[in-house]
Image: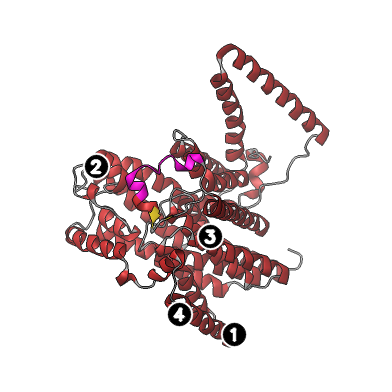
């Protein structure tokens, strides 16, 4: 595990902000094996003594603390380890929460992000790199965070405590963009994150496949007696699948963006064997996504494909687009008695969708409020926190249903303009970087991230695409990767121009 160097050792890294200095020679591997065995024996012995003396809970508490301390030090001192812990935790945390209701969901994620932020400031002290704050995306994110912080003084809010609970997560998770931008400095580490992400997506897709054909576990069925849960998950005699996530929407959106990324990379300059694997994974993700019954997710893949075509105007791509469009028209209009396929078809016929019409009515009902409240009703005034801190308010009784509507209601039309500007800047930067990057592999990764962000932007209209784990964390990794790929390409091209570099 790499630790922070001393100030003396760090002096060589001041100029670039990237060099961490040479690693010290470590002790022989045999020493670490012996130390590991001794540590395991010691921890096991202490746990047995505590269990015999005070019960199992004391032993579990001791083991938890024993694991938490080195992990915390590792997150601060080894940022790559911390980033992987954050991303994996974001993906699995709702699964653990469903298993155990009192799982400290919010606290765990907040602590991991806090340690990463602390480590970031320490590394900035030893190896300053202020360039990551000067990109258009970074500037817009800082403005966005500042606007959310200033909402504490919103004169229209009826739930000021809701601001505290909401801004905590918004500010921390947004700062992860700078963590990713600063610490992801090599193509090998970037590819490692991609592999872990797709591996986790494969696990989630396989888990949903199990739910579809072999049923739910007992801990997943404990809420199925709730009438509200039944109304949301039991549609036309079929249970919607949610895999390891909080709900079918979060599951479906994660499958969509994973499929988009795999397809994009498969169309890039890679071997035929890898293309086959990625296309197979993409098809599997799309198939299991259909089990969610989430109409809003169905339109995202065609939308991302449309942007791909717009950025690749060639005969081959146009031919693929025509064939794909004809296939989609056939699937949308073919008569069927299959419930899953029928629900897919209804996503492209919104006027026939009762839930879509209800959303339209809710939006019309809230429009006068948005028009007369440029600052909105306050951060956290709708949804869970609004119900908790201002249950009798007008906004607490409003189902947001849409990411854009939530922003407009809570942060006003000024906040909505700011949010849309942020998304526009991100997409613009992604498209510009794609055409600037020379290296084909990095070019493909930049394109994949741009298409994923574009799909999520559209997904924010019918649903709240960016507020649930893991997308709430991964979204800022996607944004950071758009600039990371360009930085890596510039570094690579510079080395080619200077042979002795």
Q: Which residue is mark 2?
A: 159
3 or 2: tag closer to the N-terminus: 2
Residue 382, horizontal then vertical, whole percent: 27, 49
Instruction: Indicate which label's residue lies in the foreground, 1 or 2.
Output: 1
Q: Assess disc 4: are there few (<14), some (14-19) or many (≥20) residues with their C-alpha within 10 Å of its C-alpha.
A: few
Q: CA distance from mark 1 to mark 2?
A: 55 Å
Q: Which residue is mark 4?
A: 329
Q: Nearer the viewer, mark 3 or mark 2?
A: 3
Local crowd at mark 3 within 10 Å, few (<14), some, or many (≥20)?
many
**In the drawing, what numbered circle is on residue 288?**
3
Residue 165 % position (x, y): 34, 40
The mark that comes first in sequence, 1 or 2, is 2
Q: On the rendered image, what quadrant is the N terminus found in?
A: top right
Q: Nearer the viewer, residue 478 or 101?
A: 101
Disc number for residue 316: 1
**Is 297 located above or below residue 155 in the figure?**
below
**Quarter location, residue 400:** bottom left
The span from disc 2 to disc 4 (Cα, nearest Å) is: 47 Å
Residue contact at pointers 3 and 2, CB within 8 angstroms? no
Sequence order check, earlier mark of 1 and 3: 3
Do the CB atoms of the residues marked 1 and 3 lie less than 8 Å apart?
no
Q: Is residue 36 visible?
A: yes
For residue 144, side relative to residue 250 (left or right): left
For label 2, the crowd category at 10 Å Cα-Cα, with few meaning under 14, some 14 to 19 and many 20 or more, is: many
- Can residue 486 be seen here? no
Dot 4 and dot 1 residues touching (CB under 8 Å)? no
Left of 440 or right of it: where is 249?
Answer: left
Tell me where the magenta segment starts and ends, as one range: 218-230
The residue that appears at 42% across and 78% down in the rendered structure is 333
């Amino acid at each position: 595990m790499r630790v922070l160097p001393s100030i003396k050792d760090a002096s060589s890294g001041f100029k670039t902000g990237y060099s961490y200095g040479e690693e010290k020679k470590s002790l022989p591997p045999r020493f670490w094996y012996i130390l590991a065995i001794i540590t395991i024996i010691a921890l096991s012995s202490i746990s047995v003594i505590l269990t015999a003396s005070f019960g199992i809970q004391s032993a579990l508490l001791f083991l938890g603390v024993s694991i938490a301390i080195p992990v915390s030090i590792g997150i601060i001192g080894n940022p790559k380890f911390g980033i992987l812990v954050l991303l994996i935790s974001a993906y699995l945390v709702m699964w653990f929460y469903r298993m155990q209701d009192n799982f400290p969901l919010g606290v765990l994620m907040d602590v991991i992000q806090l340690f990463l932020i602390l480590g970031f400031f320490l590394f900035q002290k030893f190896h300053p790199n202020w360039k990551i704050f000067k990109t258009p995306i970074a500037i817009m994110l800082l403005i966005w965070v500042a606007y959310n912080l200033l909402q504490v003084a919103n004169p229209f809010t009826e739930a000021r405590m809701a601001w505290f609970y909401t801004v905590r997560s918004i500010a921390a998770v947004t700062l992860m963009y700078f963590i990713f931008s600063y610490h992801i400095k090599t193509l090998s580490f970037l590819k490692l994150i991609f592999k872990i992400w797709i591996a986790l997506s494969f696990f989630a897709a396989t888990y949903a496949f199990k739910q579809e054909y072999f049923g739910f576990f007992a801990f997943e069925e404990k809420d199925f007696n709730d009438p509200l849960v039944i109304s949301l998950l039991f549609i036309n005699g079929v249970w919607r699948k949610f895999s390891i996530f909080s709900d079918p929407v979060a599951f479906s959106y994660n499958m969509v963006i994973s499929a988009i990324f795999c397809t994009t990379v498969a169309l890039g300059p890679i071997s035929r064997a890898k293309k086959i694997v990625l296309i197979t994974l993409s098809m599997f993700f799309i198939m299991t996504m259909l089990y969610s019954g989430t109409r809003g997710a169905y339109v995202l893949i065609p939308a991302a494909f449309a942007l791909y075509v717009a950025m690749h105007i060639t005969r081959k791509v146009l031919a693929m687009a025509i064939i794909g469009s004809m296939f989609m028209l056939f699937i949308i209009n073919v008569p069927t008695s299959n419930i899953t396929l029928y629900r897919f078809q209804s996503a492209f016929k919104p006027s026939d969708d009762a839930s879509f019409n209800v959303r339209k009515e809710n939006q019309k009902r809230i429009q006068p409020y948005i028009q007369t409240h440029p600052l909105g009703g306050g951060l956290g005034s709708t949804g869970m926190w609004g119900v908790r801190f201002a249950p009798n308010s007008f906004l607490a009784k409003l189902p947001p249903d849409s990411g854009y509507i939530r922003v407009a209601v809570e942060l006003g039309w000024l906040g909505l303009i700011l949010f849309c500007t942020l998304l526009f800047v991100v997409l613009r930067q992604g498209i510009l970087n794609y055409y600037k990057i020379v290296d084909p592999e990095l070019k493909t990764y930049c394109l994949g991230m741009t298409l994923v962000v574009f799909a999520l932007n559209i997904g924010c209209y019918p649903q709240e695409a960016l507020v649930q784990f893991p997308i709430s964390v991964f979204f800022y990794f996607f944004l950071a990767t758009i600039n990371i790929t360009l930085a890596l390409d510039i570094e690579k091209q510079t080395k080619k121009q200077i042979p002795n570099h």
